[in-house]
Image (cartoon, helix red, strand yellow):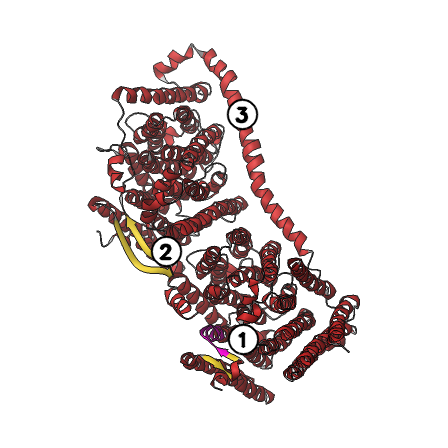
Amino acid sequence: MSVFSLFLLSALLFAGGMAGFFIRRDLVTMLLSSEIMLAGANLALLTFATMRNSIEADAIVLIVLTVAAAEVAVALAAIAVVVRRKEEATERTVSEMKG
Amino acid sequence: MRELFWLIPLFPAFGAAFLILFGRVISRKLVSWLAPSLVGLSFLFSLLSYIQLNGVWVKELFSWIKVGNLSIPFALQFDPLSSIMAVTVSGVSFLIHIYSIGYMANDWGYNRYFAYLNLFTFSMLLLVLSANLPLMFIGWEGVGLCSYLLIGFWFEKDAAADAGKKAFIVNRIGDFGFLLGIFLLFTLFGNLSFNYINSHVSAVSPGIATAAALLLFVGATGKSAQLPLYIWLPDAMEGPTPVSALIHAATMVTAGVYMVSRLFPLYQHSGFALELVAWVGIITAIFAATIALAQNDIKRVLAYSTISQIGYMFAGVGVGAVAAGMFHLFTHAFFKSLLFLCAGAVIHGVGTNDMRKMGGLRKAMPVTFWTFLIAALTISGIPGFSAFFSKDEILKEAYLSGHKWIWAIGVITAGLTAFYIFRLIFMTFYGEYRGEGHPHEAPKVMLIPMSILALFSIIGGWFPKSFAHYLSPLGYIKVIEASHSLEIYLLGASLILAIIGIYIAWLVYVKRKGKGWNFGFVYRVIYGKYYVDELYNFLFVTPYRKGSELINRYFDKGVIDRTVEGSGEAALGGGNLLSKLQTGLLKDYGLWMATGIIIGLFLAIRSLL
Amino acid sequence: MIALVPLLILVGFGIIALVLDLFLLRWWAKLSGYAGLIAASISLFFLFSKRGKFLNGLLVFDAKGIYASLLILVFTFLVFLIADGYDLKVGIVEGELYILFLFAAAGAVVMVTTSHLLVIFVGMEVLSVASYALAGLRKDELSREASVKYAILGVFSSVFFVFGMALYYGETGNLFISPEAVANPSPLMTAAALFLFAGLMFKASLVPFHIWTPDVYQGSPSPVAGFFSIVTKIAAFLAFLRISGFLVNPAVRWFLIGSIILTVIYGNFVALRQKDIKRLMAYSSISHAGYMAMALLLGEKGGWALLFYLSVYGFMNLGSFSVISSLVENNSLDDYKGLSKAAPSLAAGMAFFMISLAGFPPTGGFLAKFFLFSEVGAGGYWWLVVIAILASLLSVYYYLRVVVYMYMKGRVEKPIFAYFPSSLLAMFASILFILELGIFPRTLIYFLRIFI
């Protein structure tokens, strides 16, 4: 695959994830959509790394993935608390505050 | 005194700090001694400095801000201009502190009241003694804040709280202009001290000077209650009467006049700005005077009168007669605070503001009556009383500088002034008592300050040398000499109108309603001309009163109030509308962020094409 | 390695506290938190003479970074004081509050002392992860909602930042921020700048990335909201300052300017109608973020005005939050009615902070605005300053509304509040510092001008 088509794929993943965020109502799926966006971003990093023949980007991606995993874990925990109380977790469940 | 004059504002500052910190634990008696005596010390120091003053004293206390090429010292300046203000402010404030001991004696917020009053005096003295604009702005904001606190002092009354809010909103508009003016002057001159700006004005083009001068003047119209920002002042009368006397008559509201005088070379350099100041002033003067004709609330009459008199001062400064404007400011401080204190004594005595429920108080309150009469004669411009000299000076200078229209309007306003003030006197002190209960004279602690002010209202204008001579060290005050005959001719015109005004007031309010009251031979002389009275009433008074009621209702209440309230409502409505965007739904939130980034990318693509 | 000392101290004491908390030694855990903050601050003083780059340039200990770190530690200390007492009242019995604060502060310190994008990202994530947990610490519905909203939107925004990093890497081949690289207006670089900006604007609460702010502030425990309002902002703005070189690109500059205009207008307008004090403070913090972002337009030149503003703003905002915390989650403006009679010192303090936030002299709030606006104006953005001043006129209304509620509205029942000694201490300290910065700002300005 050419560098360009890889980059295109990463952009598509990013855009697709974003679309998923808007389409789905379910909190966990929204979070997953964000993860797809993240995969797109990481793919872009790796693409550029291949283009430049550099190993640095691989390390960067590893760090990003680790940190992001921690972030998602906390996000999931927060959602889990809501699910335990309300037995469901859509965006309507958490729309008490507004205005 | 040259080394010590900087203490003048610090006495009340100390008082305010002390009262705010310990106001809850100290006794009223201590407060009654402490607060006035600290202001008294300020007055003493001002007076001593005034006597010893030669040239211009500047004292730099410490370097407040020093950033790159911007250097703003915490510097005070005592020169002929600020000395007049310092003496007036501290003197009147001292007397009003004493008066307040009596007036506020039964108020639960006694200590808080004196804390605010001291704080106000400090801010005002800082305003007048500051040597540069940012420092003046601190005082400017400080007096605004105190005025807001004191108007809303009786916040249990909704009207008082609303009035405080109104004063605040309107003043913010003015302050906005003032602040922009300061920023503009800083970019023009790189230095914000008055002396520097005044001596370097010729370095900038008149157009830019006009812009800066007008921005500052917006601030002045707000603080000094001139068209179109005057509307807060009548409502401000909801505050305690001594506050009206001190802040809304004698000192704070004249800050705008002082500021324009302080930066007079800037206005002169602009030319247009100065002309505008004169016209705004004189139009406000006649406009407010017409409204004062139809008011029944004793304090509102005085409020409109204040607006009108400050208009005179602006007109004076605007026609180039800084000395005359400051002179009128000086005399006005005495007679207008006296008018308010007398009104306060009347309200204290009868328990209402409504003049229709007063009448015949001459016998019950003799001292108040006589001092009130002195103040009324003064404001009417009767020869011998102080305002006669100062008002005459303004009108003369207007005439001599070629502003014949301003002179004409000024003379007519003088007539109206005499009419409304004597209408007030006749409705309050003559005829029969129309209210309830038994009116009583005010206590001594109130009468003494009133008597002192009455004395100053008379002698305040008896200066051996003119104000212009005294102010001449500033370098931009010119001394005009008029021919003697012209002076008498000009003088005669305003005097005749004033007397006509008093006469008509007498006709309308004493003769027509004065049943059972005998005015001696004048009464009999007038008696035969009853139809003149009626005719006048039909042709002039009624339409006039209707007219001014209409102005009051449709312009004042309708246009300007609506604009202020309307803009407030519009802002709240805008807030309501915008807050709908915060739906509380995560999807929408994500959408906002995505929209943001898409707009950014769109901008980027556009810049590439 | 020496540059790691403050971080190691913070994290080390954090871990000690974690262990102590495990054995239910709550009080000791808290003490360990205080000790960590103090020790780290002291180490910063010693580091000041050893300014420079460390770890191959991954950590940049310049004056700006050190000063910002110090601000973060001082404000975290104030938040500790505010939280002390409040936590038990709302049922946060474990010491985790303090531990999370400590880790969040460590993340913020990382963010301000680096000019490497990945390190900024890691710092940001440490700060974020701790923040999501902090937002949800109170055990009620609003707090849980705040936590979920913050977490999901936080993940969403950090992905933007990662994507920006990827694009940046594609153009330059590394993640160091260099003046030459950021000044390059190529399409890839512009896109990178926009995505990086989006990530930071989220943290700084600039429109349209501000959207989480009101909900999260309202739902979080009060001291936590105070922490978000200042520490997160310091970190975000300092990182912003490091990448402000992007702004020579007109597309990026107009993106930020447009955002600033929307921010100051939106924040001030919507604040007008708020009935909940914490929401009001949230919108107020959005508009303040708008003012501060104006300094970014000047690049490094505006750094000192920005840092001065942040210093004053931190004391004003944390001061108000110390009072808000003392009312223990009675956050409606109606709950403030009659506070002046029931708790005069709290009411007076709150009034002072509101007046300072509104920008009245002689408080520090006035000078902060004065410096920032005159510097931005002198930098050629006069019209922007005019818009900001006009918008800030509105703010006077809603700040003074709080004062009016406390002083000019009475009510029958007594307001609910508690005097927490340490919270009062924080309040008085804030008042002192605001006055100090308002009346004698010379020392700080001198320092900022010389070193920054």
Q: In the displayed structure, would residue C289 be above or below residue B338?
A: below
The answer to whether residue C69 is magenta is yes
Q: Which residues are magenta?
A: C60-70
Judging by the rendered image, the residue that carries numbered circle 1 is C115
Q: Residues within 10 Å of mark 2 (few under 14, many from 20)?
A: many
Q: Residue at x 52, y 49 (%)?
A: B156
Q: Is residue B27 above or below residue B48?
A: below
Q: Is residue B249 magenta?
A: no
Please, what secondary structure does the residue beneath circle 3 have?
helix
Residue C445 coordinates in the image, percent (x, y): 40, 65
The subunit letter for the residue under badge 3 reads B
Chain bearing tag 1 is: C
Q: How far apart in space, not on screen, are marks 2 and 1 (Cα)? A: 50 Å
User: Which amino acid type is marked by label 3?
Assistant: Gly
Nearer the observer, C1 or B285: C1
Check residue B547 in the rendering and tell me which mark sits there, or answer none.
3
Three-letter residue code for mark 1? Ser
Q: Amino acid at mark 2?
A: Ala
Q: Is residue A61 above or below residue B199?
A: below
What secondary structure is found at the residue carrying circle 1?
A: loop
Q: Secondary structure at mark 2?
A: helix
Chain under disc 2: B
- Asked if badges 1 and 3 are on one and the same chain, I answer no
Q: Position of residue B581 (x, y in %)?
A: 69, 57
